[in-house]
Amino acid sequence: MSFSQEIIHWYQANKRSLPWRETKDPYHIWLSEIILQQTRVAQGTPYYVKFTDAFPTVFDLAAAPEEQVLKLWQGLGYYSRARNLHAAAQYVVNELNGVFPANYKALLQLKGVGDYTASAIASICFNSPEAVLDGNVYRVLSRYFGIDVPVNTTEGARLFKAIALDQLDLANPSDYNQAIMEFGALQCTPKLTDCPSCPLQSTCVAYRTQKVTVLPVKLPKQKPVKVYHYYFVFVDPFGNTLYEKRTGKGIWEGLYQFPLATFSAPRTVEGLLTSMETAIDFSLYENAKHFVYHDTYIVHKLTHRHIYATFIVIETAVTLKKGMPFGSIDQFPTAVLISDFINAFKNSYF
């Protein structure tokens, strides 16, 4: 059998039962692909179920408030994906009468849809001869053909796209694309590779040349930047706090947070409370008590930055005019870093 036939044969015997594999509806396939970008299947599946329950159709998603979409997305990270998801749904409803594009080029017009997602939707839903390239596919092709060109370069992207197209099963691109992604997820995995049971073992260049552990090649990523976040958690005599929506652009755009001061180097809490380095109303500190909720920084790692967070609880004697009940703030979308603090603080403080 050819490479593609071997892959499909393996897939038919080993594929997982996943909810989005029960349909060819482009709305559901698109939803699953957006959720699974940079997300493991085990983590993404419950989100797919939540979204399809809350928004059975693209019309339901388009009509939803952005805050509801962000709240359901909470915990997945990369919140721009959720904002793009919402915007694309509105585009499909308002500009395309709720009908998803049926070809690769038209799918690329949807916000948040790139080459991989457009290829996946076009092939899975419409059986179009478009080859997918994700991390799993890069790994399988790199090892099988023994390619050491770095996958995260322009040259690598072009080369692997050409190989992926050359290997595509034109008679069954839907199953083939799903098969090679599943093969990389379950069989040809990053570290725990089960080469002895692999049906491609006899023709795999990496196995034959003992390069399985070094392929694929990736150029080193830029070292993440350290950022120091100091959150001011006010609590007034009535159990109200200050909680605000982030404005401007950024990874957490549209999410809610406590008043925040951000620095590129650490600060002392006492220094912050006596300086003008924050935009906090210092009149709220009058007759106030404060304490740091954690003994050490809470480290929250993102792709390009590592956040070192401190939550400073300020028990103010002043009634917060713009405050809201602490018990109600968890209804708003926020980052996991803040959500985890809220849950812990509610249980220990109130």
Image: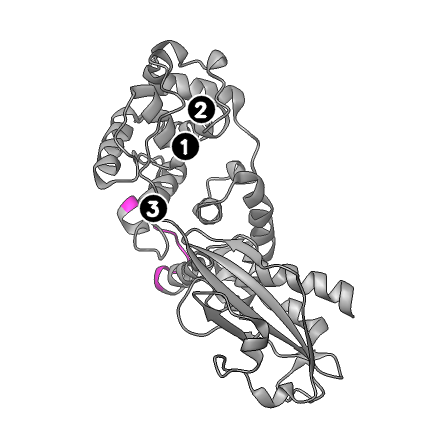
Q: Is residue 93 visible?
A: yes
Residue 155 at what x, y percent from top left? 21, 37
Q: Nearer the viewer, residue 283 or 271?
A: 271
Residue 42, picture quadrant: top right
User: According to the image, label 2 marks what residue?
Assistant: 188
Q: Is residue 55 visible?
A: no
Q: Residues within 10 Å of mark 3 (few under 14, many from 20)?
A: some
- Quadrant for the C terminus, please: bottom right
Q: CA distance from mark 2 to mark 3?
A: 31 Å
Q: Residue at x 46, y 40 (%)?
A: 24
Residue 276 at what x, y percent from top left? 49, 84
User: According to the image, label 3 marks what residue?
Assistant: 102
Q: Secondary structure at mark 2?
A: loop
Q: Residues within 10 Å of mark 1 (few under 14, many from 20)?
A: many
Do labels 3 and 1 touch, CB within 8 Å? Answer: no
Sequence order check, earlier mark of 3 and 1: 3
Horizontal arrangement in the rendering, residue 319 relative to residue 56 (left or right) = right
